[in-house]
Image (cartoon, rainbow, N blue to C red):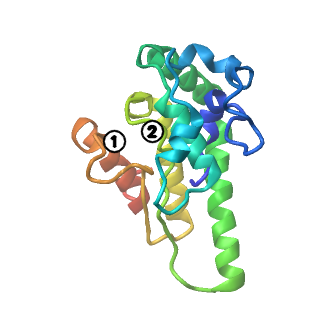
Amino acid sequence: MPCWPVYGVFEQNLMGGDIDLGDPATYAPIRRFLRRDLVPFQAIVDSRAGRPPLKDDWYRRIWLYRNLDPNAMPELERLLQEHLEQNINLYKQKATDAVEQAVKVRDELFPDIALVLGEGASYCADHRLRWEERSDAYWDVVEHAARVYHEHGFWGAVARTNGGPEDPVWHEYPERLQRANAVFLGEKP
């Protein structure tokens, strides 16, 4: 599922290029989650000097999560968890819609080619935010997405966007990944 907007409750509208991150009023609604000693946005942009540019919203995302106050993370994780639980059917529907759109495009442009999804049902926000891994609601969405991938004949899919070998889930919750894989393979409902 390439769209994981659950973090929008924290990111607000701060990813838009017309938002001035130098103006404290723009991030006032989430100020309680940010460090007192904010790294300026321009410092993030300048840190990329000499490297290929990023899309503007990634500079903003890096700024936001770099400035996340570790002491505020438990409250933020509760907020994100509650938002997901209250909107779980919306996120399941987003997974279904994304798969149906991929199949539609494939059928129109490249009939009969295999589909493999390289983006999972999650988001790379901040490695210190660990609520997804512990959330039954999150894994319910992951399993739903895996089921939809299977039903639409996908050849492969990444269960989690950050599901590489460094993902702590491989060691902390391997049974969750194994179950999602079994759902994808059609071995579990």
State the residue in front, 131 or 111: 131
Q: Position of residue 43 (x, y in %)?
A: 52, 38
Q: Position of residue 5 (x, y in %)?
A: 63, 40
- Does residue 59 appear left or right of residue 163 in this picture? right
Contact between marks 2 and 1 (CB within 8 A): the answer is yes
**Residue at horizontal 46%, vertical 19%?**
69
Three-letter amino acid code at the position of disc 1: Arg
User: Which residue in the protein does label 2 denote?
Assistant: 139
Q: Position of residue 86 (x, y in %)?
A: 64, 25
- Does residue 41 appear left or right of residue 35 in this picture? right
Label 2 sits on a secondary structure element that is helix
Callout 2 crowding tier (Cα within 10 Å): few <14, some 14–19, many ≥20: many
Three-letter amino acid code at the position of disc 2: Trp
State the residue in front, 146 or 54: 54
Above/below status of 110 relative to 64: below
State the residue in front, 141 or 122: 122
Please tell me in which quadrant of the rendered image residue 185 appears: bottom left
Label 1 sits on a secondary structure element that is helix
Above/below status of 21 relative to 95: above
State the residue in front, 175 or 19: 19
- Does residue 129 appear left or right of residue 19 in this picture? left
Residue 176 is labelled as 1
**Residue at horizontal 36%, vertical 55%?**
181
* Camera sees residue 122: no
**Residue at horizontal 49%, vertical 58%?**
119
Tell which residue pokes out farthest to the left in this image: 171
* Camera sees residue 23: yes
